[in-house]
Amino acid sequence: MSGPVAPADANPQVPGAGLACPEPTLELLAGRATEVGGTPVVRVLPKRERRTVGAWCFADHFGPADADRAGMNVGPHPHIGLQTVTWLVEGRVLHRDSLGSEQLIRPGQLNLMTAGRGVSHAEETPPGADGRLHGVQLWVAQPEATRAGDPDFEHHDTLPEAEAGGAVATVLVGGFAGVRSPARTDTPLVGVDLALRGGEATFPLEPGFEYGLVPLAGTWRVDGAGLAPGVLAYLGEGRTELRLDGEPGSRALLLGGEPFAEPVLMWWNFVGRHRDELDAARRDWEGHSGRFGEVDSPLDRLEAPAPYWAT
Ligand code: MN
């Protein structure tokens, strides 16, 4: 998926943006309601106050929505400098990209696309899909070492799980509670789906990581605070464990990683460091330069808007 990031949330020059927090904290940051390809979403990252959590730089919580009515149909569009992570709670999405990948994703499976110097893709509601659509679209900023590298796509049908107390943790990327996802990571990073079956749970954390919790369903209690969908709960660094409690059936995504030290500039579907790189990517996409390849999709190609610094 894609969608414009509000300049105030994405501009590294905004005062107060991305202050490091080297100790445990609990900041509740309200998401921003928007819409992507016909589906209502709540954008919980980036926020002006928290532009990244580890290398995670974008998080849209979409649905729950009626897929018959809204669906998800995002036409071919480009990316640079990031990985897209698609994670579904309910429904199905068909991914097609300029590498020739065509991959249906279902709940519990992972689609991970690495843009590097350039890739394009489309996301469609597959024919015959019915029922609900609910999930998360995430971006991971690539580091200097890989951001000009080759594009890539991975699909993982099954992912490792860890259980503790009344919770099941499914590890999307990175290592968590003794298990490790097979998915590619370019920086020390972790992403975990947490499902509460009942009661409370305690999981070990990496004290050198910062973490954020994105509630997806139900209600949670963390550090004595009640959490519900629509927020990013930023947890800071220096924690050795996470104690969770909530109502059975609650779901949340835990995002974490080593604080990302490189200055990230995000605009439209591009992640870079400088405006001239993003301007060049826009010119290449609008000029059909071949950098982003072609996507075999029935949907219309998205046009890049003018960046906020050009208006
Ligand atoms: Mn996309």
Image (spheres, helix red, strand yellow):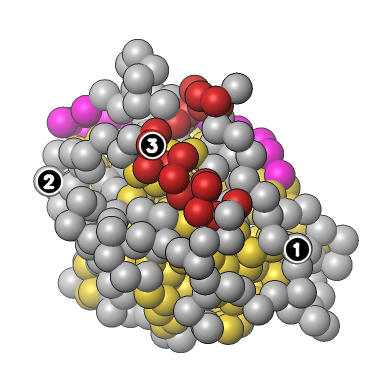
- Tell whether label 3 touches label 1 (CB within 8 Å): no
* Residue 294 located left or right of residue 85: right
> Which quadrant would residue 211 be assigned to in this image?
top left
> Is 269 drawn above or below residue 114 in the view shown?
above
> Is 129 drawn above or below residue 75 in the view shown?
below
If you read the primary sequence from the N terminus, does the residue marked by circle 1 or circle 3 appear first? 3
Dominant SS in magenta: strand
Tell me the quarter of the image containing the C terminus: top right
- Label 3: state its secondary structure: helix
If you read the primary sequence from the N terminus, does the residue marked by circle 1 or circle 2 appear first? 2
Q: State the residue position of label 2.
A: 208
Report the label total. Answer: 3
* Residue 248 located left or right of residue 254: right
In the image, which residues are magenta? 20-35
> Which quadrant would residue 173 be assigned to in this image?
bottom left
Q: State the residue position of label 1.
A: 300
Task: Please say whether residue 205 is one of the residues in the magenta stretch.
Answer: no
- Label 2: state its secondary structure: loop
Taking the spot 58% from the left edge, 73% from the top edge, the residue there is 294
Taking the spot 38% from the left edge, 74% from the top edge, the residue there is 152
- Residue 271 at x, y = what percent? 40, 46
- Label 1: state its secondary structure: loop
Q: Is residue 192 visible?
A: no
Identified by mark 2, the residue type is Gly
Q: State the residue position of label 3.
A: 276
If you read the primary sequence from the N terminus, does the residue marked by circle 2 or circle 3 appear first? 2
Identified by mark 3, the residue type is Asp
Taking the spot 18% from the left edge, 39% from the top edge, the residue there is 261
Taking the spot 17% from the left edge, 57% from the top edge, the residue there is 145
Q: Dot 2 surroundings within 10 Å: few (below 14), some, or many (20 or more)?
A: some
Q: Dot 3 surroundings within 10 Å: few (below 14), some, or many (20 or more)?
A: few
